[in-house]
Amino acid sequence: MRFKFFSLILLFSVVSLSCWGFAQSPTPPAPFAFKQDDIVAIYGNGLADRMQHSPWDEAVLQIQLADLNVSFRNMSFSGDVDNKRPRNQGFMDDKAYLNHVNPTVIFTFFGYNESFDGPNGASAFSERLGKLVEQYRVWRKEAGTDARFVLFSPIAFENTGDPNLPDGVEQNKNLAAYTAATKQAAEKAGVTFVDLYTPTLEL
């Protein structure tokens, strides 16, 4: 879909400036900026998973960050949700995988799969996402790293005009609720939030 291209270019053209919009909270984090030798772990479901196969995001970033030696480790799977990782037997657990990758930065792209629980599930999602940040923060500190976090909202659902597909009206109501929930989680955790829903809805 064209959304995949335009949303990622929009996102990472902003990111490449190393000056992001961040959640307003009593103690807001400093604007996000990449640092020398950063390792970025990417978690999420469909959107993040597709970044592995159409890596426009990393291409745009690496052009801008060539002197910083930043690397990316995409740990996303389309079937994942914030609190479940369906895996084959023998796959590393979340903590072991995180420590194996050893990131200094963690991006999360959750909210789309979770949005099928409807608006009534948004509050619980926000709570779980906040707990995920805190758990990962603890694990990284145990490993000697003070990780920085960026929570991304889901993108909007595109109405393609195909009569065999939904028009996205109900889906976007749900996604708006999960965008707000992601922002709330970022505020509580004191980490950076990026709204992908609003600009992609406009597109």
Image: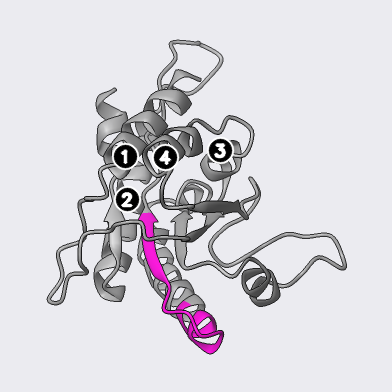
N-terminal label among 2 and 3: 3
User: Secondary structure under badge 2?
Assistant: helix
N-terminal label among 4 and 3: 3
User: For the magenta stretch, what is the residue range?
Assistant: 137-151
Q: Is residue 150 magenta?
A: yes
In the image, which disc is placed on residue 51?
Answer: 3
Q: Which amino acid does label 2 sit on?
A: Thr
Q: Does the magenta stretch include residue 176?
A: no
Q: Which residue lies furthest to the front in this view?
A: 67
Q: Which residue lies furthest to the bottom in this view?
A: 142
Kindly check if marks 4 and 1 are in contact, taking CB atoms under 8 A apart as contact.
Answer: no
Alpha carbon separation for disc pair 2 and 1: 7 Å
The residue singled out by tag 2 in the image is 179
**Could you tell whether 133 is left or right of 203 in the image?**
right
Question: Measured from the top left, where is residue 200 in percent x and y?
Answer: 32, 30
Report which quarter residue 133 is drawn in.
bottom left
Question: Measured from the top left, where is residue 156 in percent x and y?
Answer: 37, 34
Alpha carbon separation for disc pair 4 and 1: 21 Å
Kindly check if marks 2 and 3 are in contact, taking CB atoms under 8 A apart as contact.
Answer: no
The residue singled out by tag 4 in the image is 61
- Name the image colouring: one colour
Comparing marks 1 and 3, which lies closer to the viewer? 3
The residue singled out by tag 1 in the image is 197
Q: Which amino acid does label 4 sit on?
A: Leu
N-terminal label among 1 and 3: 3
Kindly check if marks 2 and 1 are in contact, taking CB atoms under 8 A apart as contact.
Answer: yes
Alpha carbon separation for disc pair 2 and 4: 24 Å
Comparing marks 4 and 3, which lies closer to the viewer? 4
> 10 Å neighbourhood of mark 4: few (<14), some, or many (≥20)?
some
> 10 Å neighbourhood of mark 2: few (<14), some, or many (≥20)?
many
Q: In this view, does 163 lie above or below 87?
A: above
Question: Nearest the camera: 73 or 65?
Answer: 65
